[in-house]
Amino acid sequence: MSYKVKLNIFEGPFDLLVYLIESARMSIYDIQVSQITSQYLSVIDEMKKSDVLVASEFMVLAATLIDIKSKMLLPRMSLDGNDGEYEDPRTALVQKLLEYKKFKAASELLTAREEDSLLIYEKPKEDLSIYTNDPDELLTLDINQFVRAFNDFVIKKRKVDEIRRNYERDERHRITTEARIQLITDRIAKEAGRTFSFFELIPDRGNTYDTALSFVSILEMLKQRKIDAKQKSLFGDITITATAYLMTGLDDSQGLQEESIYDK
Amino acid sequence: MTSKKSIKSAFESMMFIWGEPLSAKLAAEVFNIESKEAYDFFKELQSEYEEESRGIRIREVNKSFQFVTDSDNAEYIQRLCTPIKHRRLTQSALEVLAIIAYKQPVTRGEIEAIRGIKCDRVLEGLQKRELIEEVGRSTGIGRPILYGTTDAFLKYFGFASLRELPEIEDIESAIEFEESAGILDLQQIELEFPEGQQPSDE
């Protein structure tokens, strides 16, 4: 608003006009158009002199005033010579000025209210996030996202449970093949020459893990030629007998050592 | 059923934490009571603070309530918080606001017709300060934007609701009164008038 800076007194052409009318102590219903127009134009001239860009709206009102002034100079008579239906050329302007004055009065009232309420202080809204624990994030989820998130949580929990179960079982069976071989060797050595059933070589608890561990141990011992094993039928019992090797060189590390020396 | 006394006490705590105007509806939901009931409780609290001349008062803004300071203490707050920032609205902003407040919803064209001058910048500024907002579009040619005032407007001028705006008829009658006082002047001018016309008649 280029004119706003320059014309800090008059907020617009109506403002200026109302000011001129009031300071001339003129009734708004009977504006002395000739007098007001010349005053109005001289104000605009002054504005121009002080190198002010006069807003086009001021010029529009100036033109309107001159128009009204010229109409006022014409005889107050309509074409058919009837004097009665003469319409005051100022009426439209007066209506506009009255409307403007009404709101100017309202704005003055607001100014007073503003003055009063500037004395009242409020606290700005404080950051409540320290109490709310990021509710925004939760609130932005729609129901599908929420269901998906819940499902993810359930699946994850199930996986974790499963892992935990396996982990616990692992811990329980920390027996290694080496330990089992030692156990079996001790057992066989006690009653050398006897034929053992595979099931005799499984410790008391005898679950799947123990069975598998004993089986793997026996395979390992077979490889080391410590035992002979026979299975007469498919899925039948396996019979195990100690070899001379087991009986002579109980220490398998010794045996291995001998073998490695032999290789050299 | 929670007692009235404890609800009112809770409302005080809630207003304290909330800072911004707390709507009666929201407060009512917390206690699962009717909004109207909550509203009445807030009004009771408001008058209690007033009766006791407390330094803190309760301000109503469009059925929401907020703790504010007593205006009598403004001077001490200003001494405490120096330099205090006072940003008053310009005369043109106030004029535009007055037009919007009374004629809302209103288009820019209507505002400009009343003021006789452009006001796009003023509208922009008022919108930025959230004192006014776009409330829709007129069905007229070009479907111009309609403007209305906001709750921030009510708060800024200390109105509890738009109903508190003085009747425009009251303002008009104030002008009418002024006019009737001017009738004497009118008659004086009437005397002058024929003189001015005489030369043109001759």
Image (tube, coloured by chain):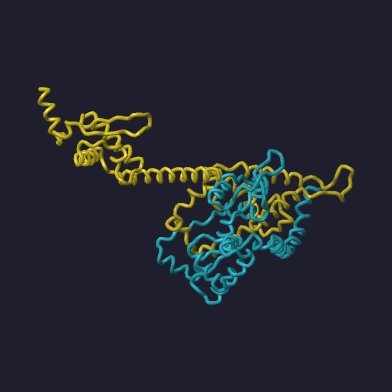
The foreground one among A84 and B84 is B84
Residue A31 against residue B56 in the figure, above or below? above
Q: Residue at x 49, y 49 (%)?
A: A138
Give the x, y percent position of residue B39.
61, 66
The foreground one among B8 and B158 is B8
Left or right of B94? Residue A132 is left
Give the x, y percent position of residue A223.
23, 28
| Image quarter in which the N terminus of chain A is found | top right
Can see residue A111? no
Q: Which chain is cyan?
A: B
Give the x, y percent position of residue B45.
56, 71
Find chain A in the image and tell me its colour: yellow
Give the x, y percent position of residue A261.
10, 26
Can see residue B173? yes
Residue at the bottom extreme, as displayed: B52
The foreground one among A114 and A251 is A251
| Image quarter in which the C terminus of chain A is found | top left
